[in-house]
Image (spheres, helix red, strand yellow):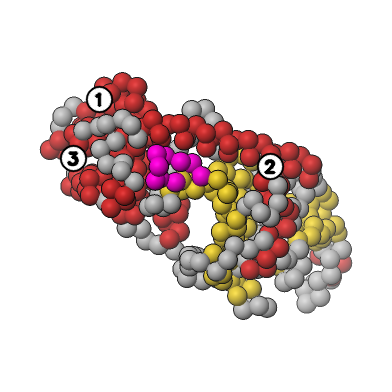
Amino acid sequence: MAHNLNYNEQTSKHSFFSVKEKAWHNLGQVISDYPTSAEAIKHAGLDYHVEKRPLFTYDSENHHGNTDLIIPEIQVPNYYATVRTDTEQVLGVVGNDYEVVQNVNAFEFFDAIVGGKDGILYETAGALGNGERIFITAKLPDYIRVGKDDLIEQFLFLTTSHDGYGSITAAFTPVRIVCANTLNAAMNNHSNSIKIRHTASAKDRLKQAHQLLGLTNLLADELEEVFNNWSRIRITDHAVKRLIQIAMAPSKEVLNNLQSGKLDELSSTYNNMVTSVMEYALTSPTQQEVTTKGTLYGAYNAVTGYFQNVRNFKDDEAKFKSIMYGTGLQRSQTAFNLCKGFAKHGIEGLN
């Protein structure tokens, strides 16, 4: 899979930075300290401007068969090209109402969430393709605390584009410090993200930035309460295996065979995967370090930890996609729902 990071021929650098650790095929700039938003923009190669320019076509009848000289003559009404001014590359075609959100505005959005440079820590940022899509991950200063020793970092992820496809999307996702498990838990009916149309004004975007902060605080408080409750609920190894079997079922057919007791019809691939998750639940050092073994919280972390620390992926991008919005997210969400059922009804909550 190609990394698709933007390569700027003028600077001979890939448009990406990360703090302390390499990522994305070991490309981009690695820096030792958390940057300010102004520094992050430069490190990530995002210090370029995007303009909306009129679109033109030409009248072929006026050229009398001479195609060597093509002069734009007819303006295309109500449509514009978005152009990166430093490289003159066309990034997309947009309509009349489309408002360019400059890269610097995306960072200002994040700064506004926590009130300035001392509140948010920029971890990664970069551009894809010709620079038509950018992304930023930033760490909030507070943690979700489970028991005494388990701290869950709070991250915000933002992506926006200059090609007319998709809204500005900002999402909250917590990550465990101890074993770096991404906990993509959708809390009740709350979404963990907001979407902002490119037609929104700067004032509206700022308002939604504060809405995201409120959402983040709400999710963090709920997760902290849920996980601390789960850390006090004991669960047997037999129940953990049952939870894992259901959570990791790749299809309704497998789930039906499991629930009807037709274990001999389960594939060896599925059984081996269940065994790997179970081994992680029982023997992983991270489960011991934060004293989650034997608890419902530990059972949940076994599933998320499998995708983060055990399963082999083709590359970092495949892993990221699985955990953020693919199979890893789906299995983790199923495990989260099963844990909620067990917390309320015991072993019957897994049926």
The residue singled out by tag 1 in the image is 347
Q: Which mark is residue 209?
A: 2
Do we see residue 169 in this rendering? yes
> Hey, which residue is sitting farthest left in the picture?
264
Decide: marks 2, 3 in contact (CB < 8 A)? no
Q: Secondary structure at mark 1?
A: helix
Q: Which mark is residue 159?
A: none
- The part of the chain drawn in magenta is 143-151
Q: Is residue 148 magenta?
A: yes
Q: Amino acid at mark 1?
A: Ile
Q: Nearer the viewer, mark 1 or mark 3?
A: 1
197 vs 332, left or right, is right
Report the residue at 77% width, 73% height from top. Answer: 67
Q: Secondary structure at mark 2?
A: helix
- Residue closest to the eye, 193 or 227: 227
Above or below, 331 relative to 15: above
User: Looking at the rendering, which quadrant does residue 316 occupy?
Assistant: bottom left
Above or below, 141 relative to 56: above
Report the residue at 30% width, 39% height from top. Answer: 299
The residue singled out by tag 3 in the image is 266
- Residue closest to the eye, 80 or 216: 216
Above or below, 112 relative to 231: below
